[in-house]
Image: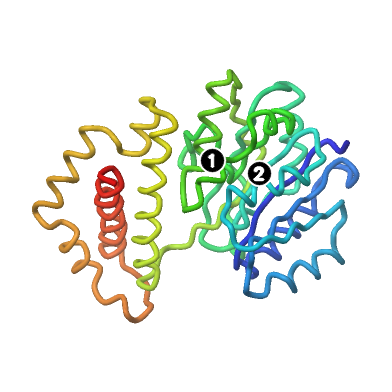
Amino acid sequence: MTRATIQLCTFNRARLLERVLDACFEQTVDSGAYEVVLVNDGSTDGTAEVIERARERATCSFAVVEQANSGLAKGRNAGIARASGERIIFIDDDVLPLPNFVEEHLRAHDRHPKAIVRGGAIDVQNFDDLPPAIWSLANYSGNFFWTTNVSLPLVTMRAIGGFDESFAEYGWEDIDVGLRLRAGGVKAVFHPAALVYHYKPRPRSGNVEKMVKQSRAQARTAVKLAAIHPHWRTYLATGLNPVQRAFHAAARRIGAADRYRRAVGDVAVDRALDDRELFAARALANEAYFEELEDALRE
């Protein structure tokens, strides 16, 4: 058994995937110590060509699982089934690992063999102008289990049954895993030296409707998460609590979403959003989330 599996899923991100895979192959640990398992979730862009080029450049074992577009939960489970490493390290297809990434995850596991290891992430707007690889609190995430950069023993992941495939829409499938692991007594440690760059481009006007649609999907899955995990952590994380629901109910009564939409301006033509428009776009998506949350609760 290899010491570690880097597992990632991809969907229509050929432009980023090539760089991500190259970074996965350029690790400081021995090439026999780890593998890369990629799940292609029914991509329709140039992903197939990227994968073929990656096969030629791979310096470690590289396995590809092809599936029809089915979402992250099913894709992650396909990757887990294919993995052979003692530890499984989850990243996303918009994450660029540093060369010592696997080495640092394994170093942390040597000290905490049964734990979840949460690595550090630095948000960047592109992969061509990267800041110094120095993590700071500005990039801190309090998520217990966040598939942007996290690892744990493969046997532990399989023991809880992997990801819940009923989370078919966007959001919360990794939080569900974290809540189940926490309930099972698994501890988590933060090891920022296991560092990645996380692609987070500044939204443009052409992204606004996608942001709203994604927020609505996330609200529907939030209700599902709360039904499975009726716990204060869930209610706080999802906004399913009296304080946040009352605040956004008041915002709907005064037509806040319409005001935010007007502040965003014309989205028919793709253009850069200024700071005021970006604030309004994010607020609009947030209001859509809480509106959909109430609809999902009624249903």
Residue at 54% across, 32% down: 178
Question: Eyeballing the image, is 114 above or below 118?
Answer: above
> Mark 2 and 1 residues: CB-CB less than 8 Å, in contact?
yes
Indicate which disc residue 90 carries.
Answer: 2
Image quarter hosting the N terminus? top right
For residue 293, side relative to residue 44 (left or right): left
Q: Residue furthest left?
A: 254
Image coords of residue 98 (percent x, y)? 70, 48
For residue 72, side relative to residue 4 (left or right): left
Look at mark 1 in the image and give the residue it sits on: 174
Question: Eyeballing the image, is 25 above or below 226?
Answer: below
Q: Residue furthest front?
A: 299
Tag 1: residue type?
Answer: Asp
Tag 2: residue type?
Answer: Phe
Image coords of residue 104 (percent x, y)? 73, 36
- The local crowd at label 1, few if under 14, some if 14 to 19, many if 20 or more residues have their Cα within 10 Å, is many
For residue 247, side relative to residue 241 (left or right): left
In this rendered view, identify the residue nearer to me: 66 or 148: 66
